[in-house]
Amino acid sequence: ERLLIAVDDSSNGKFMSRVAGTIAGTHGMPTTVLHITDTTDSEKKTTSKEKDAANKRTDATAAAAAKADVKKSPPKSRAKSAKRGKSAKDRPPKDRPAETKAEHAGEQVQAAAEQIKSEQNAEEHPDADVDVTTKVHDRPDPDVVAEEAAKGYDLMMIGLEKTTARGNEFHEAVTKLAVCFEGPVAISATRGALDNNPDGKLSILVPVNGTEAARRGAEFGIALARANKAPLSLLYVAQRNAPRHGRLHRAIRSRQHEEAILKDIVRIAESYNMSIRTAIVADATADKAILKQAERGRANLVVMGVGRRPGDKLYFGETAAALLENAECSLLFVGS
């Protein structure tokens, strides 16, 4: 019913703002955007202070020179030489204050929500409008997240420039935000086409394995594909490790189980008049099968439902870690 979003100014942050707006617009969810100032901003602030100090020294020198020549310059010429300061809206994005950047992030969410609502049928329109609130924070602060989360949110969505560390692990900034939120989290990692153009067309692949977490990921993928009119494919990665004795019987039962899982998710899509493609791949490691299928189907986004493992680090299992390390397409993990 309520979304909490933590994003920065990166392509990944813009993409997650789009995704959040899509989900919020589809269901009429009130949304709070925590705008995280990226790490380079602190360096920019230091540099800007040095520039300001230098400018003040230059201005003081210029003022002294102007005072000395005041009698030589008529009032009109002095008036013409005066420079006007630029407002926040006139400045390029990188020079805007944090509050303006936060407002821009909120506007992205609002724009995505309004676009989705405009394309829905009359009977699909949610009863409530999307209310977006923006807040500014200099860094991913667990205390801030915990305080905000206590107000009652059902899903936290995270889109930061630095998503991974050491290839297959989540960056500390992402972990700090996620571990302080007790409910489900969605984390994006844009790569390739969507990193270059966060507003580009989507082609979605959803891997499933029969778990409740995978089913929730599939529901999320269906909602995203439906709202964006994007092609959607389901992939079941089967494990074939049965012993020789009774292998055929076990294989038949396993195949029936896999098809039943896919049919269950297909029924959800069909209830929204969506057609989706399905595939079952056997005798392959899950991550390699997913990446191979994504390449074959030209999917630029893998939406995967995952379970959060206990521990200080944010960990979704071996398959998710392998995808983080090796995927060339964008990733969206829905963790519960």
Image (spheres, helix red, strand yellow):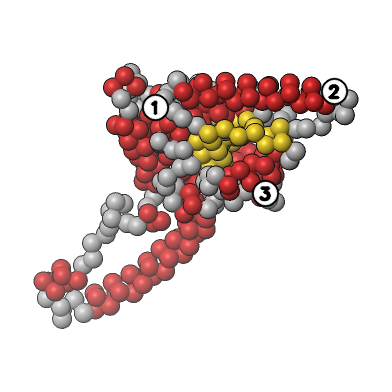
Q: Quadrant of residue 66?
A: bottom left
Residue carrying label 2: 246
Q: Residue at x 44, y 51 (%)?
A: 197
Q: Residue at x 31, y 19 (%)?
A: 123
Where is 40 relative to 146, above or below?
below
Residue carrying label 3: 325
| Callout 2–callout 3 Cβ contact below 8 Å | no
Q: In the depicted view, which residue is nearer to us: 30 or 232?
A: 232
Residue 308 picture location, percent across and down = 67, 30
Q: Residue at x 14, y 74 (%)?
A: 77
Q: Amino acid at mark 3?
A: Glu
Where is 232 relative to 82, above or below?
above
Q: Residue at x 66, y 25 (%)?
A: 258
Residue carrying label 1: 26
Q: Quadrant of residue 27?
A: top left
Q: Earlier in the sequence, mark 2 or mark 3?
A: 2
Question: Does residue 86 appear left or right of residue 40 in this picture?
Answer: left
Helix, strand or loop status at disc 1:
helix
| Callout 2–callout 1 Cβ contact below 8 Å | no
Residue 248 picture location, percent across and down = 80, 26
Q: Earlier in the sequence, mark 2 or mark 1?
A: 1
Residue 9 shows up from this direction: no
